[in-house]
Amino acid sequence: MTTLYLLSTGPGDINYLPPIAKKALQHSQYLVAYGLYLDLLGDLIDNKQCYQLPLGQEVERARLALNLASEGKTTALLSSGDIGIYAMATLVFELLDHPQERTNHPQWESVHIDVIAGISAIQTLASRVGAPIAHDFCTISLSDLLTPWEIIEKRLHNAGKGDFVIAFYNPVSRKRQWQLKKAQQILLNYRPKKTPVIIGKNLSRKNEKIIHTTLEELDIKQVDMLTLLIVGNCESQRIQTAQGQWVYTPRGYGKTL
């Protein structure tokens, strides 16, 4: 039985590639990914047969990886961060669960799937600034390409009511700017204007940039497609030390100090 690795490559810097992922990468003959993810791996992909499919061809990527593995070729389907978080893993299982796809590709049943966890963007950004997700938190994608905005807006209100720390994935794109502004307006109904907000660009990659701001002062122009945001809850704190600014969200231990 041939293995298809659903492989997480981490936020970008090769030092964040988990050893188990590196081992799976070494075992794989064929790699399927968006080109940027392959570029970040440098010489680790030397002597591999690589298939690069552009943004918008995610289904084709997943189908290709399953087909290669079903032909007896040890294959890795790659995503940055963690492949199970807003990434490619779910598409593989959607294809396996689709009646017509299963009828058309009975050979997929012979594939052994191994999901390799990775370090996500939210973990990376949190580590840069302290401990902002030390208490209950959630992630929300602001892209309405696959999820209707009405559902996203409902989730924003519920996260606001629940006082969750929130990480925003896909906050803007070239054609989509207004959703982040709307999310800002919604959350200002539930938490203080001075709530800490952290903007992380190109995390662990060249030109990484971390910006500290507040919910009230969040400037949409500082955000692009390679950006992740963390918005604190009503108890999140920003402190200044000799090392610089930190943000943390208390869990209640302060009552025992």
Image (tube, rainbow, N blue to C red):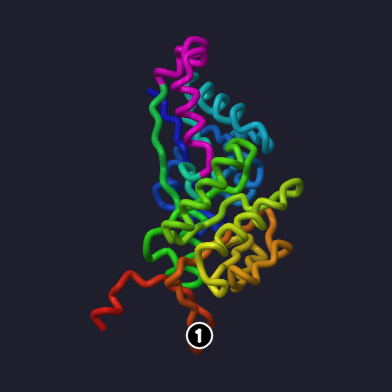
Q: Decide: is 23 above or below 107.
A: below
In this picture, residue 255 sits left or right of residue 229 = left
Q: 74 or 64: which is nearer to us?
A: 64
Q: Decide: is 26 above or below 204.
A: above
Where the N terminus falls, by quadrant?
top left
Q: Amino acid at mark 1?
A: Gln
Q: 20 or 159: which is nearer to us?
A: 159
In the image, is residue 95 part of the stretch drawn in magenta?
yes
Q: Secondary structure at mark 1?
A: strand
Residue 223 image offset from top left, x and y in percent? 68, 60
Task: Let me know if residue 42 appears in the view.
Answer: no
Residue 188 image offset from top left, x and y in percent? 57, 64
Q: Decide: is 119 above or below 102.
A: below
User: How many residues crowd mark 1 within 10 Å: few (<14), some (14–19), many (20+)?
Assistant: few
Q: What residue is rendered at 48% in x and 87% in y?
A: 241
Q: What residue is rendered at 66% in x and 51% in y?
A: 179
Q: What residue is rendered at 51% in x and 16% in y?
A: 101
Q: Main secondary structure of the magenta part?
A: helix
Residue 161 image offset from top left, x and y in percent? 45, 57
Q: Decide: is 55 above or below 159.
A: above
Q: 142 or 12: which is nearer to us?
A: 142
**Magenta-drawn segment:** 86-110
**Residue underneath mark 1:** 240
In the displayed image of the protein, which residue is found farthest to the right? 175
Residue 215 falls in image quadrant:
bottom right
Q: 21 or 257: which is nearer to us?
A: 257
